[in-house]
Structures are given as C-alpha cells and as structure tokens.
Image (spheres, rainbow, N blue to C red):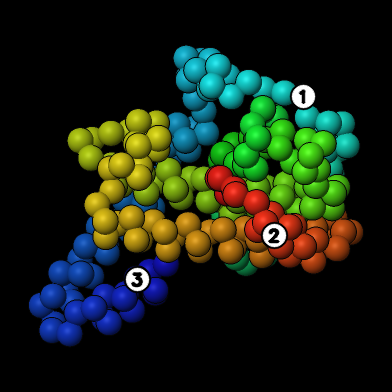
C-alpha cells in the first residue's frame, strides 16, 4: 500500500514542495490505518452490532433457513480456511486475518429476491435466498464459489479495511458503527472515486483467493469464473 501510494504522490506532484505535502499526508493516513487495523476494539466494533441494530435488520430482511447442503459446503470451506490461517502463520506474508485471533464462522440466510451476499470481520457470512429460489437456482458448485468469495474477504481482512476507511473518512468524529452505513453519503466525489478503486481491488482479490480456497478444498477453482459468468446475467447488490 505504501509503495503504491508513494508512487501516486510522485506522479501527481511534479514540484518538491507539493510532493512533500502529499507524502506527509500519506504518513498521517498510514499511521491512522495502522492504528485502526491493529486495535482489537475497532475490529470488534466493525464485527458486532447492537441488539437494536440486529432487531431492525431482522425486521427489514427476515431471516430464512439456509438449505442443509449449503451449510455443509460452508462448513467444509471454513475448515479449509482455518487450516490456511494456521499455515500462513508459518509463512510469509501471513494472511492478514492471522493476527486478529479466532473467528466465529457462521452462515445466515435472509429473504431477498436480489442476489446478495456479504461478510464481516468476525466470520459471519450472510446470503440471500435468491441463490436457491426455484426460479433461478444456482448449482452447488456456483454457490460454493460465492461462499468461498465471502470467506476470502474475511481472510484477506477486507471488512476491517473498509471499516477503517469509514472511520478515517467519516466526518464529525463518527465512530465506525455510525460511519459505515453512511459511508457513501459522507464522501466527497474524489474519495468516492478512491472508494470505487478500493472496492474493485478487494473484489478482484477475493475472487482470486476464492480460487485458492476452492483448490485447497479439492474443488475446481474455475467454478469461481463460471459463477461470475452466471451471475453477470442478473442485477446484483453487495459483494
């Protein structure tokens, strides 16, 4: 991140004075992001919601039971994910999630006709019922690929990184809980462009690591590509 951002400073600032200002801002931002990502209280703030928020979400998006075969796929993938975390601690670079302690993997379904799935930093994954609805049911291999994609987000620490950006860019001293739901409204146009670039970067990285996860679970990694081709035919929301 520092290397890329430093190069951007050099490209955008031709004179030495503006370059130094850009680099100083980069150092300040890097220190903030480092503090955020290393602070467990911030991590828990991103990962957990209050009972009131949970109740409101349940009212807006009623939960439904996830089919047994999808739960089995999720359990299989999370076991592989836990093994990869342990392996990464003995290699370099380790997975970003490796230093954040144990995860509480869980899979929840909710009623929605739109294709959507998401994950948060503590290992909670949610998936909409659209994936297994009779009218547009996806194959097991395709659903497995989408689950691997969301698990990859957690392993690569993307939910926390996004939370840290919300904390950094939020206005009026908002905490992560308050900033996250309003992130797009809070950002000026230039930062929306930066967020779009960040979003593209992490989605590509999650797709790529999902292929690793599928391969380690003895499944065809190209299922990720086929799943993306299939879902591109539908309007989607989320990650």
For the residues bearing labels 1 and 2, Cβ distance under 8 angstroms:
no
Question: What residue is rendered at 71% in x and 37% in y?
Answer: 130
- Residue 37 location (% of width, % of height): 44, 47
Which residue ends up furthest to the left in the rendered image?
17
Asked if residue 5 lies left or right of residue 80, the reply is left
- Above or below residue 2? Residue 183 is above
Q: Quadrant of the N terminus?
A: bottom left
Give me the C-alpha separation between circle 3 and circle 2: 30 Å
- Above or below residue 169? Residue 203 is below
Give me the C-alpha separation between circle 1 and circle 2: 24 Å
- Residue 81 location (% of width, % of height): 74, 49
Q: Earlier in the sequence, mark 1 or mark 2?
A: 1
Q: Residues within 10 Å of mark 2 (few under 14, many from 20)?
A: some
- The answer to which image quadrant residue 233 occupies is bottom right
Q: Residues within 10 Å of mark 1 (few under 14, many from 20)?
A: few
> Where does label 3 land, which residue?
5
Q: Residues within 10 Å of mark 3 (few under 14, many from 20)?
A: some
Give me the C-alpha separation between circle 1 and circle 3: 44 Å
Label placed on residue 228 = 2
Question: What residue is rendered at 47% in x and 14% in y?
Answer: 52
> Where does label 1 land, which residue?
65
Q: Which element is circle 1 on?
A: loop
Whether residue 57 can be seen here = yes
Q: Which element is circle 3 on?
A: helix
- Above or below residue 174? Residue 216 is below
- Residue 124 location (% of width, % of height): 64, 35
Whether residue 97 can be seen here = no
Q: Between residues 24 and 140, which one lies in front from this camera angle? A: 140
- The answer to which image quadrant residue 18 occupies is bottom left
């Amino acid at each position: 991140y520092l290397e890329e951002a430093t190069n951007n400073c050099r490209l955008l600032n031709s004179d030495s004075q503006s370059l130094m200002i850009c680099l100083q801002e980069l150092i300040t931002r890097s220190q903030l992001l480092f503090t955020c990502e290393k602070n467990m209280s911030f991590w828990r703030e991103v990962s957990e919601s209050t009972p009131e928020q949970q109740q409101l979400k349940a009212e807006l998006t009623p939960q439904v039971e996830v089919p047994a075969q999808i739960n089995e796929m999720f359990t299989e993938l999370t076991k592989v994910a836990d093994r990869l975390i342990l392996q990464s601690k003995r290699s370099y670079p380790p997975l970003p999630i490796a230093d954040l302690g144990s995860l509480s993997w869980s899979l929840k379904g909710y009623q929605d006709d739109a294709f959507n799935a998401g994950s948060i930093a503590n290992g909670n994954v949610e998936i909409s019922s659209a994936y297994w609805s009779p009218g547009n049911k996806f194959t097991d291999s395709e659903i497995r690929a989408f689950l691997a994609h969301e698990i990859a987000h957690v392993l690569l620490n993307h939910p926390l990184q996004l939370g840290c950006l919300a904390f950094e860019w939020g206005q009026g001293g908002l905490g992560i809980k308050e900033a996250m739901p309003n992130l797009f409204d809070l950002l000026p146009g230039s930062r929306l462009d930066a967020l779009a670039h960040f979003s593209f970067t992490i989605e590509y990285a999650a797709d790529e690591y999902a292929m690793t996860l599928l391969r380690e679970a003895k499944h065809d990694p190209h299922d990720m590509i086929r799943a993306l081709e299939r879902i591109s035919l539908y309007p989607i929301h989320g990650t």
